[in-house]
Image: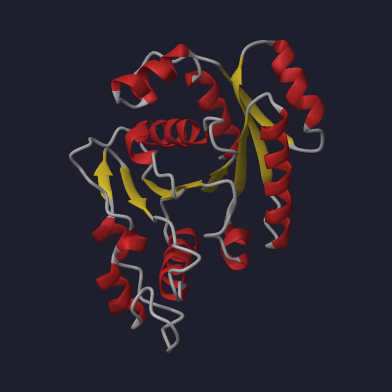
Amino acid sequence: MKIAVSGKGGVGKTTFAALLIRTLSNQGKQVIAIDADPDANLAGAVGVSKDKKITPIADMKDLIFERTEARPGTIGGFFKLNPKVDDLPEALSVKLENIKLMRLGGVKKGGAGCICPESTLLKALVTHIVLAREEVVILDMEAGIEHLGRGTAEAVDRLIIVVEPGRRSIDTAKHIKVLASEIRLKNIAIVGNKIRNEIDKSYLLDHLAGFEMLGFIPYSDAFIEADLKGISPFDTEYPASKEIEKIIGKIS
């Protein structure tokens, strides 16, 4: 099972991804969790302790040079398009229960010079994990799919877009669907988050007609309290546990 999770910032995308990851781990599944959002918060949401600092792979200049034979940020020159990455999930991940968690980091743009070596390594790593690994893979994406190439996207079982009741969240979901179609990623579904009542459910169903709806996660103060305490929402008494299990049943 290979799942990519995306959505507008602030909708609870990372919280949902973390609940998915911890629930699967609790069910005995081996999980590779990939934080592919430059605004990286997945480690804390999963429950990795703060003393386990995770260096983004995009910032590992010596590793990038070793694998691509090009220095990050340099202009011009040649580099490997198929760098060796099969050893990286074990070497660079932080372990928690049945989870291996990796942080990709953001590729600097604009005046950073040639960004090809970093991007090439990250895409090769994601491709290897999605195509060649046997674990469950959960990718916490930003509101886009830049780390997925066409071949990788076709191997992703589902792209789950997390939305909240609101126009901007819905507009983002529709934009992500367009981006996904460009790389032939067709298995797209929606999870509604921060649902307060039946009116919120109806709003999403009405405005996202044509999308598969996997489930609705109720609004909960437990998620806010977990964030304030610096713990995983999975380690609280949150009301969505059964709903997360139902969603896993639908995508398994």
The residue located at (27%, 54%) in the rendering is: 55
Q: Position of residue 63 (x, y in %)?
A: 27, 71
Q: Residue furthest bottom?
A: 77
Q: Where is residue 225 in the image (x, y as percent from the top left)?
A: 37, 16
In this rendering, the answer to whether 42 lies above or below 155 is above
Q: Is residue 238 left or right of residue 64?
A: right
In this rendering, the answer to whether 219 lies above or below 244 is above
The residue located at (30%, 25%) in the rendering is: 231
Q: In front here: 154 or 8?
A: 8
Q: Could you say which quadrant of the image residue 48 lies in?
A: top left
Q: Position of residue 178 (x, y in %)?
A: 74, 52
The residue located at (68%, 54%) in the rendering is: 180
Q: Is residue 132 left or right of residue 160?
A: left
Q: Position of residue 21 (x, y in %)?
A: 42, 37
Quadrant housing the C terminus: top right
The residue located at (31%, 48%) in the rendering is: 100
Q: In front here: 82 or 106?
A: 106
Q: Which of the colour schemes (rainbow, by chain, secondary structure, one colour) is used? A: secondary structure
Q: In front here: 152 or 242?
A: 152
